[in-house]
Image (spheres, grey):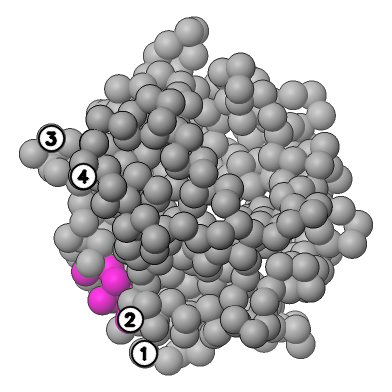
Amino acid sequence: MFEANSAEILENARRDNFAGFDPFDGLNSKLFKLAPSLKKGIFGLAWIQLHKRSTLNLRPLLGVQKARNPKGVGLFILGLLEDYQRTGDAAFLKEATRLGDWLLEQKSDQSVWKHACWGYHFDWNARAFFVPKGKPNIITTIYVAQALYALGLETGGQSYTNAALDAAYFIVDSLYTEADGRRFFAYIPGEDAFVHNASLWGAAWVAFVGDKKSDDQFKELALKVARQSVEEQAEDGSWVYGARHHHQFIDGFHTGYNLEALHIIRKAQGTSEFDDAIERGLSYYKDKLIEDDGTAKYYDSNPYPLDMHSVTQVVITLLKVSGSLEDRELARKVIEKSIETLYMPAKKRFMYQKHKGVSNKVDYMRWTQAWVYYSFSYFNRTVAEQNETN
């Protein structure tokens, strides 16, 4: 039986106490203490891109320290719970609990946001907006909420469950947006950029909590928002990333996000309304974003850069949204191909990206290793459970 090796990734993360570098953490450089205003605008954007694209890790030289990222920690918790469920080893649960306690301490300022929510541990300058450190965003909040809810189920810890459920109220109160004829959940409070995966993930968590709380208003709002993205799905099953002119691309892991989120919505709502959208989207995903040899493509028109984020979302999407034996084998094939192309045996970890002519081997905790650990642990637990029932 093939088993994806996630233990090495976990051991490396433990050595660093789950702290690491991130593709977008360049503005954490101590140099900006001298000129903090440079974080915004063209200079800040260029600085982040320099760190993100450089194959040399400039961070230690420029005063960027390793740190824990709430989303990365949430992914490690999800992986630890998968390993606990598969093995019964209480050490996994104990470690997940320690990390869950840390997440509860990292909530964004509730005197401002009123409800549980989380942001990144760095200032983030994107083309669409500038996000200061700690300002909550929808994706970090949702992955943390999923991790805390799962942890609450395993431990009976009400503090974890309460925070996870409360996150949906932040999404509804601070992120629901109506702009340019659309109804959606924004990526961050106060911005009106429409991005499908962010909006659908918001709808997924609001639908999930609406089901748990028997809240019909939440359920209806989730459906309304989900329908917006389904209406904009192309006939071939694809979605571009978002509405703005520089968002007109189709990529692998965001397509997988969309499908996973829609699947959560249909389960929470008990509806077949989105079955066709999911079926067409999954067919497009498998046909256009996974190559015959198991390569997970970054873009629909170009496999490069090879990136473990693309790989890990393939694994999660195929197992969670489809779950068929055929797609389980496809997930295995994708994992095996990623080990062949992106794994570094001497370092016992995966590189960030591989382009046609050059590889970026920088070690990113949240973007790469946390996703690998969660998805490989999820794969191993799923396969083990299916083998037991056969």
Contact flag, marks 2 and 3 (Cβ < 8 Å): no
- Picture quadrant where residue 159 is located: bottom left
Q: Is residue 90 above or below residue 340?
A: below
Mark 3: few/some/many CA within 10 Å (<14, 14-19, 20+): few
Along the line of sight, the residue nearer the viewer: 122 or 200: 122
Q: Image quadrant for the N terminus?
A: bottom right
| Mark pair 2, 3: CA separation | 31 Å
Q: Position of residue 214 (x, y in %)?
A: 32, 42
**In this rendering, which labeled residue sits more in front, label 4 or label 3?**
4
Residue at 13 percent across and 42 percent down: it is: 110
**In this rendering, which labeled residue sits more in front, label 4 or label 1?**
4
Indicate yes or no whether the magenta region holds residue 100.
Answer: yes
Q: Which residue is mark 2?
A: 95
Mark 4 is on which residue type? Answer: Lys
Regarding mark 2 in the picture, which secondary structure is present there? helix
Regarding mark 4 in the picture, which secondary structure is present there? helix
Mark 2 is on which residue type? Answer: Glu
Q: Which residue is mark 4?
A: 33
Regarding mark 1 in the picture, which secondary structure is present there? helix
Q: Which residue is mark 3?
A: 112
Chain-order first, disc 2 or disc 3: 2
- Picture quadrant where residue 249 is located: top right
Which segment did they paint magenta?
95-101
Contact flag, marks 4 and 3 (Cβ < 8 Å): no
Contact flag, marks 4 and 1 (Cβ < 8 Å): no
Q: Which residue is mark 1?
A: 91
Q: Position of residue 268 (x, y in %)?
A: 48, 46
